[in-house]
Structure formats: structure tokens, C-alpha cells
Amino acid sequence: MDDAAPTKDKPFLSDVKTLRDRARKNISEGAMTWTYKGDPKKTVEILQSVLATEIVCVLRYTMHAVSATGISSEGVKAEFAEHAKEEQEHMMAVAERITQLGGEPDFNPEGLASRSASEYSTGPTLVDMIKENLIAERIAVDHYRELIRYFGEDDPTTTRMLKWILSVEEEHADDMHDLLVAHEGKPMLPN
Ligand SMILES: [Fe+2]
Ligand SMILES: [Fe+2]
């Protein structure tokens, strides 16, 4: 860490020349500059699990979109497909952030399920699938809320990305809840 790193008393007093000199040094570190307050190795490790979670979500929703059958399954299939697409956007964003932090995104299918917070689960009926997705979304929401608190201002970029992902996962959970009510006539989760 640089001697002139910001402190509580001197929050941002680097002059332009100092900033430019620092940026020229250690350019192999890419986006990782001296002001990064997080622990990049730890951040990458955590993001690998987020990446695995998102990959599992892509796979689960894709599988559901393809295999959902039965009366009134068309609307649900479309919803599953839409979610699969959005999970893929999350997957890409997380993988890119890992790269920015100097890591190598782990797409290895081996061990994927154990790296992921949510499960690849499915059920024989449409309602089972909706329930599995709702559970997976609720796990993701809890997990990401904790991570947002953990990263906070130490890594504002990762925090911002996770906040965006969290807001989409909350919508997903809401969509699954609405579908469940529509197909079962009652919510699975008590208010
Ligand atoms: Fe996601
Ligand atoms: Fe989701």
C-alpha cells in the first residue's frame, strides 16, 4: 500500500501528477490500482462461487424452459427462458469482474454444483419447477445481500455489480412467486 493512501484525515489529496505516475507504474495489474481496498484474491475466490451460482441458474432455467409441459405452460416457459437469459448476463458480468481483478473465471463443469450456492434441481411438474426456482432465487438473494454488506466501500465496483444482480434476483423471486400463486392458487410462503 502506498504511503500516501487515503486516510480518514486525508481522504483524496493526491495531485494529478502523482495519480498519473502511479497509474503508469504496475500497469500489468490492469484495473487493480493502489486505491483498491479489498483483498483481490479473496474477492476472486468469492466471485468464483457467485459465478458458479449464476451458471447453475442458467442451466436450471434453460432446462425448465425446454422441459416445461402441460396446460398453460407456454407463458411459464417464456418466463423461464427470459430468466435464463438474464442469469447469463449475470454470469458474464461476474466472469468479467473476475478477469478485471486478475483472476481466471472458473467455468469448469467439474465441481460446479459444489461451488454454487443454489442447486440444480428440477421436478416432474410445472409447479415443482416454479418452486425450485423460487427457492434458488431466495438463496441467491440472501447470499448476495450478505456479499454486498461484506464488500461495501472496499470494492465499490463489485458492490455495484452485486446490487444490480440482487435487484434482478428479487424480481425473479417475485415472478416465481406470482407464477406459483397463479398455478396453485395460494402462495407457498406465508407472509
Ligand atoms: Fe442471476
Ligand atoms: Fe435469478
Image (cartoon, rainbow, N blue to C red):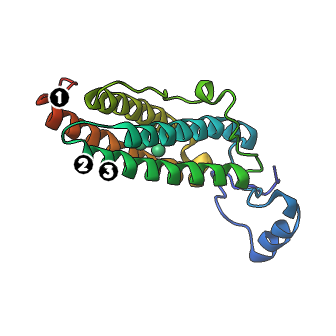
As helix, strand or loop, the secondary structure at mark 2 comes to: helix
Q: Given the image, on which type of amino acid does mark 3 rest?
A: Ala
Instruction: Please state which of residues 41 and 50 is positioned toward the viewer in this rendering.
Output: 50
Q: Position of residue 166 (x, y in %)?
A: 42, 45
Instruction: Please state which of residues 3 and 183 is positioned toward the viewer in this rendering.
Output: 183
Disc number for residue 22: none
As helix, strand or loop, the secondary structure at mark 3 comes to: helix
Q: Gap between marks 3 and 2, in whole Å?
A: 5 Å
Q: For mark 3, what is the residue?
A: 78
Ligand 2: does it lie within 8 Å of the C-beta at label 1? no
Question: Mark 3 and 2 residues: CB-CB less than 8 Å, in contact?
Answer: yes
Q: Given the image, on which type of amino acid does mark 1 rest?
A: Pro
> Residue visible at 70% across and 40% down?
106
Task: Please identify, in this view, whether the residue under mark 2 or under mark 1 is nearer the observer.
Answer: 2
> Residue visible at 83% across and 66% down?
22
Q: Gap between marks 1 and 3, in whole Å?
A: 21 Å
Q: Position of residue 176 (x, y in %)?
A: 28, 38
Determine the image quadrant of residue 15.
bottom right
Q: Residues within 10 Å of mark 1 (few under 14, many from 20)?
A: some
Q: Gap between marks 2 and 1, in whole Å?
A: 19 Å
Q: Given the image, on which type of amino acid does mark 2 rest?
A: Gly
Q: For mark 2, what is the residue?
A: 75
110 vs 56, left or right, is right
